[in-house]
Amino acid sequence: MKIIQIKTDALTQPEISKLFKKLNVKKSSFVFAAFKNNLITGIACLYQNEVHTNRDYIAVYVKEKYRREGIGSGLLHKLQSVSEKKKYQCMCDSSNTALILFLQKNGFSLARRCYNFSYKYIDKSLLNFYGTIKELNNISIYEEKELARLIFKNYSLFHKKINALSTSINDEIFYNKLIKPYNKNLSTMLLLDGKPSAYMIVYGEDEDTEIGYIGGKYKKDINIYLNYFLNRINSLSFNTEGLMFEIDDADFYAFPLIKAMNVTVRNSYNTYIAE
């Protein structure tokens, strides 16, 4: 077995390009490929994320017939040798048992699951909510600044242990560059005593409607927020042709929806980390 670093121009070669697509990444800082008898048997890459800078992202793929020959471990060691952070993150489909076993064998631990799901119904008794719902196409400058602050606070908190946000990103940058543009007609906030207290950010429209971010101000008010979230999800389901939604088990405000909505989980994407 021979493992070599692949330069960018070599990624256009048919066999290398075909295997690189298996990694499902758009760009990479380092790419290594494994060869046996001049045939490519595996590929791996390491790359960075400008938003989450605490860990290097990795991806590894070995052709099925060549697995259990130490190729994956060899590729991983090459990635580790060029990593400056020496902290790693890898995402995979929960059905990819081969990759999951490989990651666990090499010291990676499960940090988060992100669920895709469908649901049958929402109990009507859960649709009554306290407070006032306001569409984001009609909020004041103060309310929008508070919205940006709340989204940034929650996102930072729930991702801190997995891969913290870059210290160069503040609430204004995060909101303007990563949250916007969203559907202002479908996105809303919940006002309690006239003050912004919870939010639901929605993207797209019609069959491409997707709930992107939900959250609130205080954990103690989660039950109040849940009724607001459920009310809005129910409304969106009736007023759009399709509704996409992912729930991250690291998100305090979103995860309780799985139980409240009588959810059927279709699949999940797992995030593994190692140091």
Image: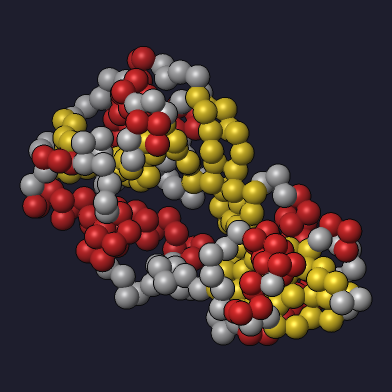
Q: Which residue is drawn at 15% across and 51% down?
A: 144
Left or right, 20 with reference to 205 = right
Q: What x and y, as percent, mark residue 68?
A: 89, 63
Residue found 27% across the figure and 53% down from its top: 180
Q: Residue 53's x, y, as percent?
A: 45, 73
- Say above or below: 256 vs 83: above
- x and y percentages locating residue 148 in the rendered image: 23, 55
Residue occupying the point 71% across, 67% down: 14
Image position of 113 with respect to 245: above or below: below
The reply to whether residue 88 is in sight is: no
Judge left or right: residue 82 versus residue 255: right
Q: Quadrant of residue 103?
A: bottom right
**Which colour scheme appears in the figure?**
secondary structure
Assign the N terminus to one quadrant of the image: bottom right
The mark total stands at 0
List x then y, in percent, for residue 147: 21, 50
Compared to residue 57, the image places residue 126 above or below, namely above
Location of residue 233 (image quadrant): top left
Query: Can the viewer see residue 240?
Result: yes
Q: Residue farthest to the top?
A: 124
Q: In which quarter of the image is the C terminus?
A: bottom right
Image side of residue 91 versus residue 175, left or right: right
Quarter residue 224 falls in: top left
Residue in the image at 81% along x and 71% along y: 40
